[in-house]
Amino acid sequence: MPDILGLKGVGAARAKAFARLGLNTTLDLLRYYPAGYEDRTNILDIRSLLPGLSCCVRAMVAETPRESRVRDGLSLTKLTAVDETGRLFLTFFNSPYVKNSLVQGKTYVFYGKIEVNGGRVCMTNPVFEPESRQGAATGRVVPVYGLTKGLTQYNLRSAVEQALERHEVSRDDPLRQIHAPDDMESLQNARDTLAYNELYALALKLAKLKSERMAKTGHIFPPLDAGEFEDSLPFKLTGAQRGAIAEVGNELSSGTLMARLIQGDVGSGKTMIAAYAGLRACRGGFQAALMAPTELLAAQHYATLKPLLDKWGVVSCLLTGRITPANKAKLHREIAGGDIEFIVGTHALISKNTVFSNLALIITDEQHRFGVSQRETLQSKGRDAHTLYMSATPIPRTLALLLYGELDVSALNELPPGRTPVKTYAVNEGYRERINKFIEKTVTGGGQVFVVCPAIGEQDAADIADVGTVHARLSAAFPRFGVGLAHGRLKQKDRAAVMASFSNGEIPILVATTVIEVGVDVPNANLMVVENADRFGLAQLHQLRGRVGRGKRESFCVLFGGGAGELAAKRLKILENSNDGFEIAELDLQLRGSGDFFGTRQHGLPELNLPRGYNISVIQKARADAERSLRGL
Ligand code: ADP
Ligand code: MG
């Protein structure tokens, strides 16, 4: 593919900036869909302008622009323009070129946001072009791209336009309409078509995988009565757990090959489903393996499962990279010999030296943290092994049916009793002082606080909170309290040390990135503050707030970012109103057309490239069409 280096306006330095966005070829540019649009098609009379509205005005410059120097480094250029219905007051900051490019008596089209001051209709720093050349910057729908340091909207738009020309993308191609829409209606059509094409291809691939699996036969494990299983537990199962156990149980008796996803919020009790399936396998003389992405999670699973497995007379072990070579060799022998039946572990399970005697059930926890090849390696260690995936990523049902097209899904949409729901508040900067007081009150009351930021280092955009800056601010604000700092660029050892001091209560406040998302269990933590919450996906925020509300204290989650526009505020409101991950994901899907659960890499599939704002009905259509065409083959 042609390199983008060499496009007009793209030299070595700019090419580097493009590369930071993953844009190396002109084809990459075509697939880099706009993050949003400015509808500049609306051209209005001055009389009908309303404050707050962004629109175009066709008006004649009524006077020579006046430039004045307000203070060092700040100059203003002012002028008025008129149409038959009124007068428009224009102000430009630091734009000396304006006085030469706007000529008295000539007509231009201006695009900008309307303000009304003392009865005067005003625009500040509008985009403009002569009426005669209208159509480039005004009078059309203009794409707005995600940027990085060293790139402007102009750079992106110009590069994409050149890419469209180079590939001779025609006017009616959705790829052109997504970048340079004729109007809002053809934009919507382009979004729907592009989304459909992408989803259809994926759905077809998944449906094929599933039909291949259905043609295979699977081991039949001897029955185990679900009631008897429940009687061996220290608690009653939830209704959702019972349902999932019934589904898994039927499948393990049916002779088909199982590939099932157990989907449920953090704390919904997915491990019990794994335990039931594992018992079925082991009591039939087979082995079961459970692979978790971290040592911590593997150890937690083992702690939960061991007493239960002991009770049933099933021999189990924990196999991680941490155990001594001598112990490891011993475990390897016992696994290979079939003496150990249920093996819980980390990546150590897929090492060359781990050989199973009769592996017939493979369970992976948080499977998106493993690559495809890792899961395939584990799969290859068994023979036609049944698989269970456990995931806490809430996906709306509409989407789950498509994305997990090759899997069957059991949903645990119910939490065991006793967890305190987290009270959530979406706020704007106006609440900063109040929230600081709240942090103080929480800590003096014996609680602990997570403060989560989207960034590690200082950002190009000044309004994005990074952990360093926030850590410094809180340390200054609360000199009496210890404030810890944890992020992915710390050495593993240092990060573990900070986490440990927070866990044991030495440090009451922890400023962190999303490294705290998985597996951190500090029951004493009862307040989470998220900076720039609008920068996170809703499902991710929901998972984050699952870090509080784990103990007896009443717990709170405060989301800053309510000031980042109407859509952002609406999205954060969803979290205020719901504690159900599936519902949150479904509403997010409706609002944005996609959500942050679109990590198809999670499933070893190519990342989907979906435009924002497509009509979600295309999801169902793509799936139905894929299934129909597969049946027709
Ligand atoms: P997750 O779905 O996040 O993996 P776990 O399986 O780790 O959840 O369960 C979370 C905790 O809840 C564990 O300590 C587990 O023993 C406990 N638990 C699971 N099911 C129930 C239940 N039905 N009633 C009470 N506690 C339960
Ligand atoms: Mg779990």
Image (cartoon, rainbow, N blue to C red):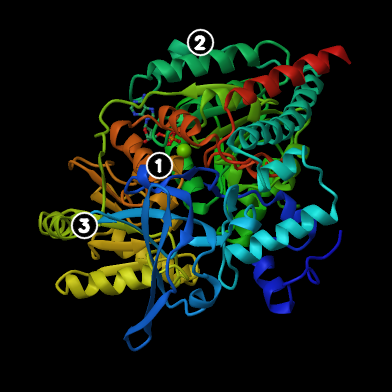
Which residue is labeled 3 in the image? 118
Badge 1 amino acid: Leu
Badge 3 amino acid: Gly
Query: Tag 3's secondary structure?
Result: loop
Query: Tag 2's secondary structure?
Result: loop
**Looking at the rendering, which quadrant does residue 463 occupy?**
bottom left
**Looking at the rendering, which quadrant does residue 509 occupy?**
bottom left
First in sequence, mark 2 or 1: give its number: 2
Badge 2 amino acid: Asp
Of circles 3 and 2, which is in front?
3
Q: Which mark is residue 225?
A: 2
Q: Which mark is residue 179?
A: none
Q: Quadrant of ligand 1?
A: top left
Of 555 and 164, which appears nearest the observer?
Answer: 164
Which residue is labeled 1 in the image? 567
How far apart in space, not on screen, are marks 2 and 1 (Cα)? 49 Å
First in sequence, mark 1 or 3: give its number: 3
Of circles 1 and 3, which is in front?
3
